[in-house]
Protein backbone atom coordinates (compact mmCIF):
# COMPACT_ATOMS: atom_id res chain seq x y z
CA UNK A 1 0.00 0.00 0.00
CA UNK A 2 2.90 2.33 0.71
CA UNK A 3 4.13 1.98 -2.88
CA UNK A 4 0.69 2.81 -4.28
CA UNK A 5 0.53 5.87 -2.03
CA UNK A 6 3.91 7.01 -3.35
CA UNK A 7 2.87 6.38 -6.96
CA UNK A 8 -0.35 8.35 -6.82
CA UNK A 9 0.18 10.99 -4.14
CA UNK A 10 3.88 11.76 -4.40
CA UNK A 11 3.85 12.08 -8.20
CA UNK A 12 6.05 9.09 -9.06
CA UNK A 13 3.84 8.63 -12.14
CA UNK A 14 4.32 11.21 -14.88
CA UNK A 15 1.42 13.22 -16.34
CA UNK A 16 1.04 10.90 -19.34
CA UNK A 17 0.71 7.86 -17.09
CA UNK A 18 -1.78 9.60 -14.81
CA UNK A 19 -3.85 10.72 -17.84
CA UNK A 20 -3.95 7.16 -19.16
CA UNK A 21 -5.23 5.87 -15.80
CA UNK A 22 -7.73 8.69 -15.21
CA UNK A 23 -10.64 7.07 -17.16
CA UNK A 24 -10.27 3.94 -15.01
CA UNK A 25 -10.79 5.91 -11.83
CA UNK A 26 -7.95 4.15 -10.01
CA UNK A 27 -6.14 5.68 -7.09
CA UNK A 28 -3.82 4.63 -4.27
CA UNK A 29 -6.56 2.66 -2.48
CA UNK A 30 -6.00 -1.04 -3.24
CA UNK A 31 -8.05 -2.79 -0.55
CA UNK A 32 -8.32 -5.89 -2.73
CA UNK A 33 -4.65 -6.59 -2.01
CA UNK A 34 -5.56 -7.10 1.64
CA UNK A 35 -8.58 -9.33 1.03
CA UNK A 36 -7.46 -11.40 -1.98
CA UNK A 37 -7.39 -15.11 -1.09
CA UNK A 38 -3.91 -15.34 -2.60
CA UNK A 39 -1.23 -13.22 -4.17
CA UNK A 40 1.34 -14.70 -6.53
CA UNK A 41 4.51 -12.92 -7.60
CA UNK A 42 6.32 -14.09 -10.74
CA UNK A 43 10.04 -13.38 -10.59
CA UNK A 44 12.42 -13.41 -13.53
CA UNK A 45 15.83 -14.96 -12.95
CA UNK A 46 18.17 -12.31 -14.37
CA UNK A 47 21.19 -14.59 -14.06
CA UNK A 48 22.38 -17.67 -12.24
CA UNK A 49 25.66 -19.12 -11.11
CA UNK A 50 27.77 -21.97 -12.42
CA UNK A 51 29.01 -24.70 -10.06
CA UNK A 52 32.31 -22.80 -9.74
CA UNK A 53 30.45 -19.67 -8.59
CA UNK A 54 30.88 -17.66 -11.78
CA UNK A 55 27.95 -15.74 -13.26
CA UNK A 56 25.73 -17.63 -15.71
CA UNK A 57 23.77 -15.47 -18.16
CA UNK A 58 20.18 -16.46 -18.93
CA UNK A 59 18.87 -15.76 -22.43
CA UNK A 60 15.37 -14.48 -23.25
CA UNK A 61 14.51 -13.83 -19.60
CA UNK A 62 11.63 -11.40 -20.22
CA UNK A 63 10.16 -13.53 -22.98
CA UNK A 64 10.31 -16.68 -20.84
CA UNK A 65 8.83 -14.91 -17.82
CA UNK A 66 6.02 -13.52 -19.99
CA UNK A 67 5.22 -16.94 -21.45
CA UNK A 68 5.24 -18.51 -17.98
CA UNK A 69 2.92 -15.78 -16.68
CA UNK A 70 0.54 -16.37 -19.61
CA UNK A 71 0.47 -20.12 -18.98
CA UNK A 72 -0.20 -19.46 -15.29
CA UNK A 73 -3.14 -17.14 -16.03
CA UNK A 74 -4.55 -19.62 -18.57
CA UNK A 75 -4.30 -22.48 -16.05
CA UNK A 76 -6.06 -20.40 -13.40
CA UNK A 77 -8.86 -19.58 -15.83
CA UNK A 78 -9.18 -23.25 -16.88
CA UNK A 79 -9.74 -24.07 -13.21
CA UNK A 80 -12.73 -21.71 -13.23
CA UNK A 81 -10.93 -19.02 -11.24
CA UNK A 82 -10.01 -15.50 -12.23
CA UNK A 83 -6.92 -13.43 -11.70
CA UNK A 84 -5.84 -9.90 -12.29
CA UNK A 85 -2.24 -8.92 -13.01
CA UNK A 86 -0.95 -6.21 -10.73
CA UNK A 87 2.33 -4.61 -11.71
CA UNK A 88 3.25 -1.91 -9.23
CA UNK A 89 6.12 0.25 -10.32
CA UNK A 90 8.74 -0.02 -9.07
CA UNK A 91 8.46 -3.63 -7.91
CA UNK A 92 11.90 -4.03 -6.32
CA UNK A 93 10.32 -3.86 -2.85
CA UNK A 94 8.74 -7.29 -3.54
CA UNK A 95 12.15 -8.94 -3.84
CA UNK A 96 13.20 -7.47 -0.50
CA UNK A 97 9.86 -8.13 1.18
CA UNK A 98 9.79 -11.78 0.04
CA UNK A 99 13.51 -12.27 0.74
CA UNK A 100 14.34 -13.34 -2.81
CA UNK A 101 17.94 -13.45 -4.07
CA UNK A 102 19.44 -10.47 -5.91
CA UNK A 103 19.61 -12.63 -9.04
CA UNK A 104 15.81 -12.36 -9.34
CA UNK A 105 13.62 -9.42 -10.23
CA UNK A 106 9.84 -9.19 -9.82
CA UNK A 107 8.12 -9.52 -13.20
CA UNK A 108 4.41 -9.41 -12.32
CA UNK A 109 2.06 -10.00 -9.44
CA UNK A 110 -1.34 -11.69 -9.66
CA UNK A 111 -4.27 -11.59 -7.32
Image (tube, rainbow, N blue to C red):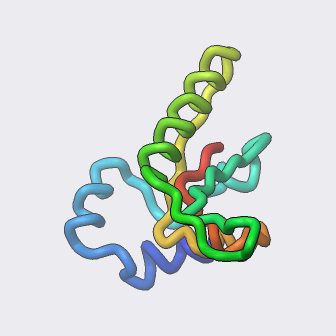
Vertically, is 65 above or below 102? Answer: above
Assign the C terminus to one quadrant of the image: top right
Q: Residue furthest front?
A: 52
Residue found at x 67% / y 23%: 81
Q: Nearer the viewer, residue 81 or 61?
A: 61
Describe residue 49's horizontal placement relative to residue 19 as left or right: right
Callout count: 0
Residue 73 lies, in percent from the top left, at: 57, 30
Vertically, is 19 above or below 60? Answer: below
Residue found at x 47% / y 68%: 89
Residue found at x 29% / y 66%: 18
Assign the N terminus to one quadrant of the image: bottom right
Q: Residue furthest bottom?
A: 10
Q: Nearer the viewer, residue 6 or 57?
A: 57
Q: Nearer the viewer, residue 12 or 53?
A: 53
Residue 61 lies, in percent from the top left, at: 48, 53
Describe residue 8's horizontal placement relative to residue 55 as left or right: left
Vertically, is 98 above or below 25? Answer: below
Residue 44 quadrant: bottom right
Residue 106 quadrant: bottom right
Residue 104 lies, in percent from the top left, at: 63, 65
Residue 24 lies, in percent from the top left, at: 35, 48
Amino acid sequence: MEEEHTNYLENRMNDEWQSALAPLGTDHHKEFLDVAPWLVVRFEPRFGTHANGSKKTHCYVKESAGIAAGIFVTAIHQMGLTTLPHTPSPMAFLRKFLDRPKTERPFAAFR
